[in-house]
Image (tube, rainbow, N blue to C red):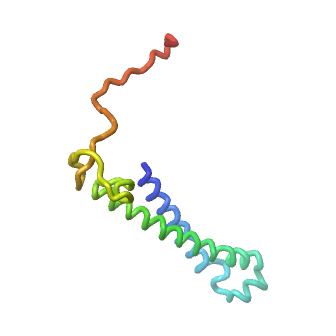
Amino acid sequence: FFYGFVVSLCFLAGSFVVGVSLWLRDGPCSSLGFGTCVTHKPGIAILYVLAWPLVVIVGLLLLAVSLFALWHLWLIIRGRTTREVLTGRSQGEGVRTLCARRSRSLIRGKDKIVFPDLQNGV
């Protein structure tokens, strides 16, 4: 779930950067020069001045989060956890996963699940 969140965050930031960049390029002051826009449409000129730093900041964050997502994709493909990579130690016995060996699961999938009886209040 975490990796899906990171990827969706990349798409959101990418759509923001592309959308605002296109608006800045083809917006209401694109045919006018910036100086003319300041004198005739000061509100739009203020938006232009505020939008460029936002595009740069979000673009840099997009780059950082994209690299973070690619690193975690590499970890998923290798079948390793972040802890294993950062500490340099592998844990447990090796069972096959997608591309590499993994340690034993902490979840016992064959255990019976018992739900409480909610109708009788027990």
Determine the image quadrant of residue 82. bottom left
Q: Nearer the viewer, residue 99 or 6?
A: 99
Q: Is residue 93 left or right of residue 85?
A: left
Residue at 56 percent of width and 69 percent of height:
58
- Residue 50 image point, x, y percent: 68, 74
Q: From what the image shows, is residue 7 above or below residue 92?
A: below
Q: Is residue 115 left or right of residue 61?
A: left
Residue at 73 percent of width and 88 percent of height:
36
Q: From what the image shows, is residue 100 above or below residue 16?
A: above
- Residue 35 image point, x, y percent: 73, 89
Q: From what the image shows, is residue 108 above or below residue 112?
A: below
Numbered disc total: 0
Residue at 26 percent of width and 49 percent of height:
102
- Residue 68 image point, x, y percent: 43, 63
Q: Nearer the viewer, residue 119 or 90?
A: 90
Q: Is residue 95 left or right of residue 69?
A: left
- Residue 22 image point, x, y percent: 56, 75
Q: Is residue 16 left or right of residue 106?
A: right
Residue at 55 percent of width and 67 percent of height:
16
